[in-house]
Amino acid sequence: MRKFLTALVVIPLGLVLMVFAVANRHFVTVSFDPFVSNDPSFSVTLPLFLLLIVVAALGVVAGGCAVWLGQRHWRRAARRHDADARAARGELADLRAQSAAARPESQRLPVPSGVGLYGPVGRDKQRATL
């Protein structure tokens, strides 16, 4: 189902991008010099569709970085809680080992032989033979 939904979104999006690229093949000049507009010292000439795709990709990367930086508090808290849980599990294992070592064997009751869960072996609750 996931592959189907991915294909349902990606294939039309790819077709739209291809149609956009074919329709906008003319070149544009992008200037990064705000002081000299007629002869900029640093400019790039590239097709319009490529410019828009690069700008969109940079926007996605910038948004992803902003979200990642915004969630640093949650990641730090998750690491701290994970360390606390590991320490608690280790302490629990040590306490269980100490408890098992401290329990004497004489306190354990012997298992009665020939007696099942409901009484003598081979019978159920109503004493019927199995």
Image (cartoon, rainbow, N blue to C red):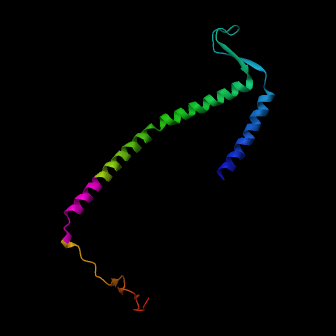
Where residue 15 appears, as percent x and y from the top left, is: 77, 38
The residue positioned farthest toward the right in the image shown = 23
User: Which residue is at 47% across, 38% downward?
Assistant: 71
Which residue is drawn at the image coordinates 41% and 44% (left, top)? Answer: 78
- 51 part of magenta stretch: no
Q: Quadrant of residue 110?
A: bottom left
Name which residue lies at 64% across and 8% down.
Answer: 41
Q: Main secondary structure of the magenta part?
A: helix
| Residue 114 relative to residue 35: left or right | left
Residues in magenta?
91-105
Q: Is residue 115 left or right of residue 65?
A: left
Magenta stretch: includes residue 99: yes
Q: Position of residue 10 (x, y in %)?
A: 70, 42
Q: Position of residue 60 (x, y in %)?
A: 60, 33
Instruction: Locate residue 126, reporting x and y percent.
Output: 41, 91
Q: Is residue 126 above or below residue 45?
A: below
- Residue drawn where x is 67% and y is 9% of the image: 40
88 relative to 54 in the view: left or right = left
In the rendered image, the vertical position of residue 85 relative to residue 44, given as above or below: below
109 w.r.t. 28: above or below:
below
Please, is residue 107 above or below residue 7 in the view? below
- Considering the image in quadrants, where does the C terminus appear? bottom left
